């Protein structure tokens, strides 16, 4: 079944993984780099497995068959809308700020 890409939606054209980061080049010229720790299957994969990716839906996502991993470009561009990580230090910046702010409010409320 063919999948079409909506107008204005960025698609992945190049994907690389280092030991610490996933880097995706988009068709509009942007490069997105995120910690590999966000994706435990990629983090635990071999370099060869990380290099064996294929586009999903014309590039709106990325698939690694051998490790059964799928990542959408949208989740890389707006991780706070798509990901929930156990370790707060690995949270996307905006989500980490939200949690710190909530914690501060709770402390202030407890103090009275």
Image: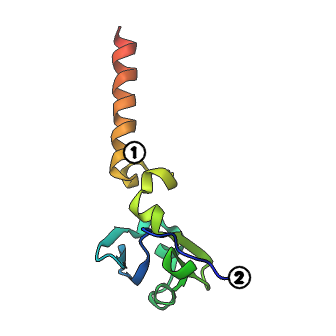
Q: How many marks can you see?
A: 2
Foreground of the two, 85 or 5: 5
- Is 41 situated above or below 87? below
In percent of width and height, residue 40 lies at 51, 68
- Is 12 situated above or below 93? below
Quarter of the rendering occupied by the N terminus: bottom right
Which residue occupies 42% across, 64% down?
A: 76
Instruction: Report the residue that reaches farthest toward the front.
Output: 7
Which residue occupies 41% across, 71% down?
A: 10
Q: Secondary structure at mark 2?
A: loop
Which residue position holds label 1?
A: 95
Kindly report the distance in space between the C-alpha atoms of the residues bearing marks 2 and 1: 36 Å
Instruction: Report the residue that reaches farthest toward the top.
Output: 112
Foreground of the two, 60 or 64: 60
Foreground of the two, 42 or 82: 82
Instruction: Report the residue that reaches farthest toward the right.
Output: 1
In percent of width and height, residue 57 lies at 57, 78
Q: Secondary structure at mark 1?
A: helix
Quarter of the rendering occupied by the C terminus: top left
Q: Earlier in the sequence, mark 2 or mark 1?
A: 2
Crowding at mark 2 (Cα within 10 Å: few <14, some 14-19, many 20+): few
In percent of width and height, residue 2 lies at 65, 82
């Amino acid at each position: 079944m063919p999948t079409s890409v909506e107008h204005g939606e960025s698609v992945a054209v190049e994907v690389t993984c280092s030991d610490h980061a996933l880097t995706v080049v988009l068709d509009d010229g942007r490069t997105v780099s995120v910690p590999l720790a966000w994706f435990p299957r990629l983090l635990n994969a071999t370099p060869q497995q990380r290099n064996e990716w294929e586009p999903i839906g014309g590039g709106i996502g990325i698939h690694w068959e051998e490790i059964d991993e799928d990542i959408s470009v949208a989740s890389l561009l707006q991780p706070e809308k798509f990901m929930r990580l156990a370790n707060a230090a690995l949270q996307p910046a905006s989500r980490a700020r939200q949690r710190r702010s909530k914690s501060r409010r709770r402390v202030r409320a407890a103090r009275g």
